[in-house]
Image (tube, rainbow, N blue to C red):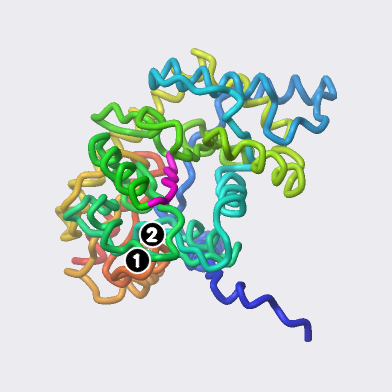
Amino acid sequence: MTEIARRMAQIAPFHVMDLLAKARQLEAQGRSIIHMEIGEPDYPTPEPVVAAAQEALSGGNVHYTPATGLPQLRQKIAAYYKSKYRVDVDPHQVIVTPGSSGALQLLMNVLINPGESVLMADPGYPCNRHFVSMVDGIPVGVPVGEETAYQLTAELVEQAWRDDTKAVLIASPSNPTGTLLAEAELRQLYDKVTELGGVLIVDEIYLGLTYGVDANTALDISSEICVISSFSKYFSMTGWRLGWMVAPEAMIDPLDRLAQNMFLSAPTLSQMAALSAFSPEVISILEQRRLAFQQRRDFLLPALRDLGFSLPVTPQGAFYLYAGCGEHASDSQKLAQQLLNEAGVAVTPGLDFGFNRPESYLRFAYTTAMDQLQEGVARIARFFA
């Protein structure tokens, strides 16, 4: 038999996919399932974006683009930082990628040598540690809890720093907790990472989805921070597979060379569509959706607390609630299966998000309509009763 590369032993599957497959199977049998497991906006891509793609396709404008992206799209992304966050970004430093995952793969290949480590919060998005493992680096999960709003701090980074540490990767707002770092905390973190000789990487793919707070980009602190973003979440373009990064000037050439070899360019049709994503018409649609997400959070958060779930920190972004379920069960994986099979509610167990007490948490995604959330809460209440 063909011997599989040893690094693949470090690549875990998404456990929620098994649960999703079971949910689809139950639906095929006629069962009603409330979906709160999927981290994907339930809204369709805004119509002007779809129309731009249709126009590009009918005109045959689907040839390769430069590896770093359409120049006019890079300019629009830079202009977006100026208009929304009052930050000057050189379009030359914007790299358009096949999703934010493509950006992180490029960045890890350019930054991390075999045996070098990257610090990240645990719990956190599981693919991040896998991107490090793919380049034979060492992902180091640093346990975080409610006392730091499930985010890394300068103090935690200093305590966890190793001789082989090369970078620190954070997400603000984060998946699965929905929490974000205040600007002062982020500045302290950047200063500490710089002092220790490392690189700070900030995942901002949920930055457009914040509630009750005007969060700013990490680029407001320094242009030496590597910032990852995406059209998937705020822009409702998940399947278009389009993201970007803003990288320090010294990294642009190696990122460009690697992108040429790794995937030539991001999907041209998606890039042509995204040219319309920053129009006032589309932004107005997206802002209405952001307010709807906030209304969903404001319903689901107290409702889960009333059901006995532990949510000591109010998340200010994304569309997730990471709820402690210790009052109800000692095994979140088993509880998630029971909620699906007996209550018809699909949620994600903590096992997907790291090694920091995953058995004690469930992630609820409010990526479904309010009436569905209300029905889901009612079903969970009946299940516990």
Q: Is residue 199 magenta?
A: yes
In this view, the residue in front, 175 or 348, is 175
* Magenta-drawn stretch, dominant element (helix, strand or loop): strand
What residue did someone put label 1 on? Answer: 339
Secondary structure under tag 2 reads loop
Q: Quadrant of residue 150?
A: bottom left
> Magenta residues, as a range?
197-204
Q: Quadrant of residue 10?
A: bottom right
What residue did someone put label 2 on? Answer: 347
Residue at (30% x, 47% y) in the render: 192
Q: Is residue 308 above or below residue 244?
A: below
In this view, the residue in front, 358 or 141, is 141
Residue 235 is left or right of residue 124, and the answer is right
Quadrant for the C terminus in the image: bottom left
Q: Is residue 176 above or below residue 260?
A: below
Residue 361 is left or right of residue 367, and the answer is left
- Whole-percent x, y for residue 216 in the image: 34, 29
Q: Is residue 316 magenta?
A: no
Residue at (60% x, 62% y) in the render: 135
What residue occupies the far top of the structure in this picture? Answer: 280
